[in-house]
Image (cartoon, rainbow, N blue to C red):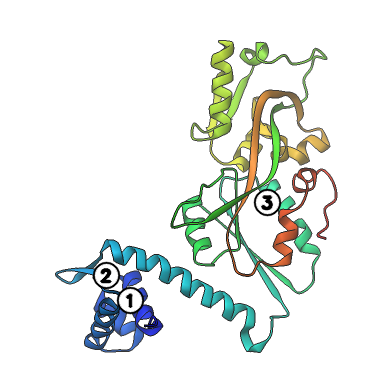
């Protein structure tokens, strides 16, 4: 017996909507016809897919598993349609990139810069929380997600975390009036400091180092957005804890200087993808670039 994909599509639509009446209206079929199609699928599979509680429908364990397979099947169909529409590959390609909203804007720009030189390519950039972006990635709404956190795969989500670059984290600030080198951690007490928020892995590592050295510091501000951290470093007399890519322009012009590299503290940058039957050669080239190119320290061209 072969799977009836027409029945599976009806099940998938109801599972996504959670309501039989609304789904029937969206699909322009009667509620009874929709219900009978799902019942036929349940009989074919030998499993109940929904628990009917009044007017609402709840997925059974078998239903949740079936939904996982249905998502993959119909996402693959959408991918095939996008690639082969009108019987040929589309001449103008689209690359859809999501980035965690708090990620360095400089890093994002460095990552996409090679794409700006390509003809017949449209770039779609979206920002959001990591969970929202991963949801769009799972249904082929995005091609990859940029993050400073690795995402581990599970049975339902075969995430692939490609480490793009690793950069030491530094303390930066306005030019100092003394030529005496800044000594970490002894000189921390002489400055107010701008830090990433407590949820940041950089902050956790920094606090651990300070605890190990038994030193304290005076916090001017805690921010979860690297763009705001950059502004505070530039516009106050505080020092800031950042990967230097965040303030690359200010360091280049001398508005800010690097006081020191914090020992054993790094930030990793990842591109998160899911396994596709077809992956764009452009994306493969993006993921193969060296750290210096991704961080904007040397010219970067796609090969």
Image disc number at residue 108: 3
Badge 1 is on which residue? 11
Q: Say whether residue 62 is left or right of residue 184.
A: left
Which quadrant holds the C terminus? bottom right
In the rendered structure, are the residues bearing label 2 and label 1 in contact, judged by CB atoms less than 8 Å apart?
A: yes
Name the front one of labels 2 and 3: 2
The picture places residue 298, in percent across and down from the top left corner, at: 84, 46
Residue at image x 77%, y 41%?
A: 249
**Which residue is nearer to you in this view: 6 or 175?**
6
Which quadrant holds the N terminus? bottom left
Q: Is residue 276 visible?
A: yes
Residue at image x 59%, y 19%?
A: 209
Residue 59's place in the image compared with 266, above or below, is below
**Which residue is nearer to you in this view: 257 or 212?**
212
- Quarter occupied by residue 169: top right
- Quarter occupied by residue 291: top right
Badge 2 is on which residue? 49
Which residue of the protein is positioned furthest toward the front in this rendering?
A: 1
SS class, disc 3: helix
**Which residue is nearer to you in this view: 27 or 36?**
36
Among numbered discs 2 and 3, the one appearing first in the sequence: 2
In the rendered structure, are the residues bearing label 2 and label 3 in contact, judged by CB atoms less than 8 Å apart?
A: no
Residue 17's place in the image compared with 110, above or below, is below
SS class, disc 2: loop
Distance, label 2 to label 3, CA atoms, is 42 Å
């Amino acid at each position: 017996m072969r799977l009836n994909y027409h029945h599976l599509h009806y099940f998938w639509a109801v599972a996504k909507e959670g309501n039989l009446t609304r789904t029937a209206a969206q699909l322009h079929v009667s509620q009874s016809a929709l219900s009978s199609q799902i019942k036929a699928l349940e009989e074919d599979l030998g499993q109940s897919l929904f628990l009917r509680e009044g007017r609402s429908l709840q997925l059974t364990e078998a239903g949740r598993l079936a939904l996982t397979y249905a998502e993959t099947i119909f996402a693959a169909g959408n991918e095939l349609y996008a690639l082969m529409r009108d019987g040929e590959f589309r001449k103008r390609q689209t690359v859809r990139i999501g980035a965690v909203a708090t990620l360095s804007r400089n890093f994002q720009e460095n990552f996409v810069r090679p794409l700006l030189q390509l003809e017949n390519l449209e770039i779609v950039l979206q920002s959001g929380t990591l969970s929202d972006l991963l949801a769009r990635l799972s249904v082929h709404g995005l091609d990859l997600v940029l993050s400073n956190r690795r995402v581990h795969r599970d049975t339902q989500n075969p995430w692939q975390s490609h480490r793009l670059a690793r950069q030491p984290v530094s303390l930066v600030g306005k030019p100092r009036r003394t030529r005496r080198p800044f000594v970490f951690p002894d000189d921390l007490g002489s400055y107010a400091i701008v830090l990433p928020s407590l949820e940041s892995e950089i902050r956790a590592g920094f606090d651990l180092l300070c605890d190990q050295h038994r030193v304290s510091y005076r916090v001017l501000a805690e921010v979860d957005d690297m763009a705001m951290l950059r502004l505070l470093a530039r516009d106050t007399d505080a020092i800031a804890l950042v990967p230097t890519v965040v303030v690359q322009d200010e360091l280049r012009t001398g508005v800010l200087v690097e006081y020191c590299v914090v020992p054993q503290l790094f930030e990793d940058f990842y591109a998160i993808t899911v396994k596709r039957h077809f992956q764009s050669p452009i994306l493969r080239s993006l993921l193969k670039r060296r750290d210096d190119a991704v961080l904007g320290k040397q010219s970067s061209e796609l090969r």
